[in-house]
Amino acid sequence: MDPGTVALALELPDGTVTTYTYAGGTVTKDSVGNYSKDVSVTTPGTYQYRWTSTGTGQGSEEGWFQVRPRKVA
């Protein structure tokens, strides 16, 4: 079952937050109830994210991932 809305907030290492939404066409629906977003990560540091949905199937999930500096030119 699909939720009413789906959004992804992504915080970059510099503190900038960008929100992507399914309604806005920046989040992809992979199948019923499953959504994804491809992001380019070019700055080393910690990226934090939070998925949220409303309505049927409402919920949220937070996490983070680390991008290390490039070692080879």
Image: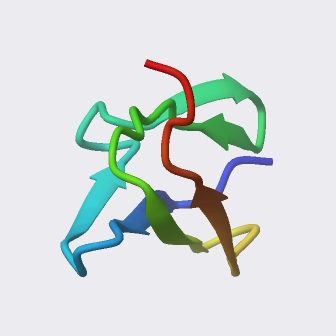
Image-quadrant location for residue 60: bottom right
Percent coordinates x, y for residue 57 in the rendering: 76, 68
Image-quadrant location for residue 3: bottom right
Viewed as shown, does residue 25 lie left or right of 68?
left
How many badges with numbers are in the image? Answer: 0
Q: As rendered, which of 2 and 11 lies closer to the eye?
A: 11
Residue appearing at x 46%, y 66% in the figure:
45
Q: Tell which residue pokes out farthest to the top in this image.
A: 73
Viewed as shown, does residue 31 lie left or right of 44?
right
Viewed as shown, does residue 17 lie left or right of 13?
left
Q: In this view, does 35 lie above or below 53?
A: above
Image-quadrant location for residue 15: bottom left
Percent coordinates x, y for residue 4 in the rendering: 52, 61
Viewed as shown, does residue 49 lie left or right of 7?
right
Percent coordinates x, y for residue 42 in the rendering: 35, 38
Residue appearing at x 76%, y 44% in the figure:
33
Q: In this view, does 69 lie above or below 59?
A: above
